[in-house]
Amino acid sequence: MMAGSRPKWDISDVDEWGPDDHELGATIPESGNSVLNITGGWRSLLPIIDCEKCDGCLLCYFYCPDASILMEDGKAVGVDLDHCKGCGICAKECPAKAITMVAEKKE
């Protein structure tokens, strides 16, 4: 962390940084609980789940590298958008084709 009381990820003065002040990009430098690291902002594709098509096989849940598939009564019902990075593994592994990837519109 740079000097001062700024939040750890504050880069508001990036234009003033020298070569020694730059952190690695797109990394989470601390080990620990990933719940504290909101990574969904990296996503460009958004998984959409058709709950009517879901047959409850759980493959999306088991294959998701971010543990982002939300389950209810044994079926996929949504996605934790704070942590989903839009990789599309859930859609690829879904044999019922209940998950489609769409371009996410950022506001």
Image: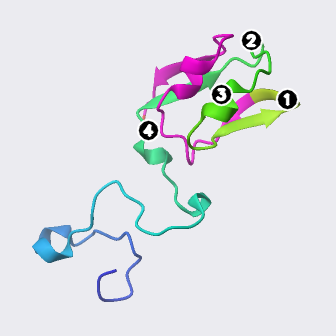
**Relative to residue 20, is residue 26 drawn left or right?**
right
**Relative to residue 29, is residue 16 drawn left or right?**
left
Q: Residue at x 14, y 68 (%)?
A: 15
Q: Amino acid at mark 3?
A: Cys
* Quarter of the image that includes the C terminus: top left
Judging by the rendered image, the residue that carries numbered circle 1 is: 74
Q: Residue at x 57, y 48 (%)?
A: 82
What label does residue 43 carry, if any? 4
Judging by the rendered image, the residue that carries numbered circle 2 is: 53
Judging by the rendered image, the residue that carries numbered circle 3 is: 60
**Relative to residue 81, is residue 22 drawn left or right?**
left
| Circle nearer the N terminus (2, 3) | 2
Q: Is residue 17 visible?
A: no
Which residue range is magenta in the image?
77-105
Q: At numbered mark 2, what does the secondary structure look like: helix, strand or loop?
A: loop
What whole-number distance in Å separates the C-alpha atoms at marks 2 and 1?
Answer: 13 Å
Residue 85 at what x, y percent from top left? Answer: 48, 40
Of badges 3 and 4, the one in the foreground is: 3
| Circle nearer the N terminus (3, 4) | 4
